[in-house]
Amino acid sequence: MKFAAPSRSRPRNSPSSATLPPPPLAGEGWGGGKLPTATDTGLATTASEAPVLTIAGVGKRFASGLQALGGVDLTVRRGEFVSLLGPSGCGKSTLLRIVAGLSQPSTGNCALHLDTAPGQRVASGRVGFVFQDATLMPWSTVLNNVLLPFRIARHLGAAERERAAAALRSVSLAGFENAYPHQLSGGMRMRVSIARALVTEPDLLLLDEPFAALDEITRLALNDDLLRLWETRRPTVLFVTHSVFESVYLSTRIAVMAARPGRIVADLPVDLPHPRERAIRTAPDYVAACEQVSAALGAAMPQGATR
Ligand SMILES: Nc1ncnc2c1ncn2[C@@H]1O[C@H](COP(=O)(O)OP(=O)(O)O)[C@@H](O)[C@H]1O
Ligand SMILES: [Mg+2]
């Protein structure tokens, strides 16, 4: 079963929405459970939703001559949670950087559909990016780290401070506003990083192996937090991982990548129901989905690479 995002009431074509982070939606918190879940609202399939991202024939050749990506095609629709799954070095980060506008494709086209007027720059707050490292400013408090997108946009007032506080509450960091990054655990630092990416209510959330450096217990807890977030707020997510189990647990769709050059070799829907609880990790359907994805990944690996 797949679900679509609920329609959102924010005016997307208002003059300010393309240049400033959009206004907060009342009562929203990071997986805070205040909004109805996808199952509560009986949502339709995501196939009918508008694309947020289209990647068409994207290739990337670095100055070194290395062909990192060759002919990647991918469409991500509003409200989907799509994982890019592939072995190390297959070009996942390169593709994510192109989507974020941090790097240009050598061939092909990558377009975000964020209701921005033709020719108008997409404001930074419309796309959230979470890296593998939390990338916090060590000299700033937790609250000031989360306020960074507003400072960059030169739009920081009482409402933005409240949004940052709400984002921190929703990642279970209420009370840590004045702490410094070195006083937090790795998992807590990553929560701050996710709160910073979410505070502008981005249309598209990009995550590049955000939990890869964390211990297994913390990783599982943050997987659950991210699921609750997606089930309650339905952001559009493009999530990079090299973990089959993580991708099946979290995603509505998995794009399996192969290397040299990086390309998508399988596009697999994950038809597990929501809300997904941890118990699903031992359910036969979950195990079967993991086997299917593993097989696609194995077929994408060069001969002998899995041994
Ligand atoms: N700036 C760069 N210049 C040259 N080669 C690069 C650059 N960035 C990445 N690469 C190479 O491109 C390939 C894909 O890298 P990357 O996208 O980081 O893979 P992944 O995220 O899947 O591990 C790798 O072989 C990597 O060494
Ligand atoms: Mg990478």
Image (cartoon, rainbow, N blue to C red):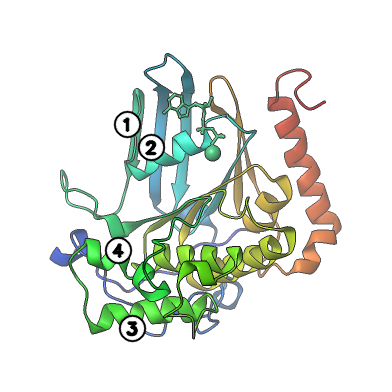
Q: Provide the residue designation for mark 4.
A: 149
Whether label 4 touches label 3, CB < 8 Å: no
Query: Is disc 3 placed on a helix, strand or loop?
Result: helix
Percent x, y for residue 24?
Answer: 32, 77
Query: Is disc 1 placed on a helix, strand or loop?
Result: loop
Q: Provide the residue designation for mark 3.
A: 162
Q: Provide the residue designation for mark 1.
A: 104
Q: CA gap, disc 2 to disc 4?
A: 20 Å
Percent x, y for residue 144?
Answer: 34, 72
What number is the disc on residue 98? Answer: 2
Q: Residues within 10 Å of mark 3 (few under 14, many from 20)?
A: some
The nearer-to-camera label among 1 and 4 is: 4
What number is the disc on residue 117? Answer: none
Whether label 1 touches label 2, CB < 8 Å: yes
Q: Residues within 10 Å of mark 4 (few under 14, many from 20)?
A: many
Disc 4 or 3, which lies upstream in sequence? 4
Task: Identify residue type, mark 4.
Answer: Pro
Q: CA gap, disc 3 to disc 2?
A: 32 Å
Disc 2 or 4, which lies upstream in sequence? 2
Label 1 beta carbon within 8 A of ligand 1: no
Disc 1 or 3, which lies upstream in sequence? 1
Label 4 beta carbon within 8 A of ligand 2: no
Quick check: 131 left or right of 202?
right
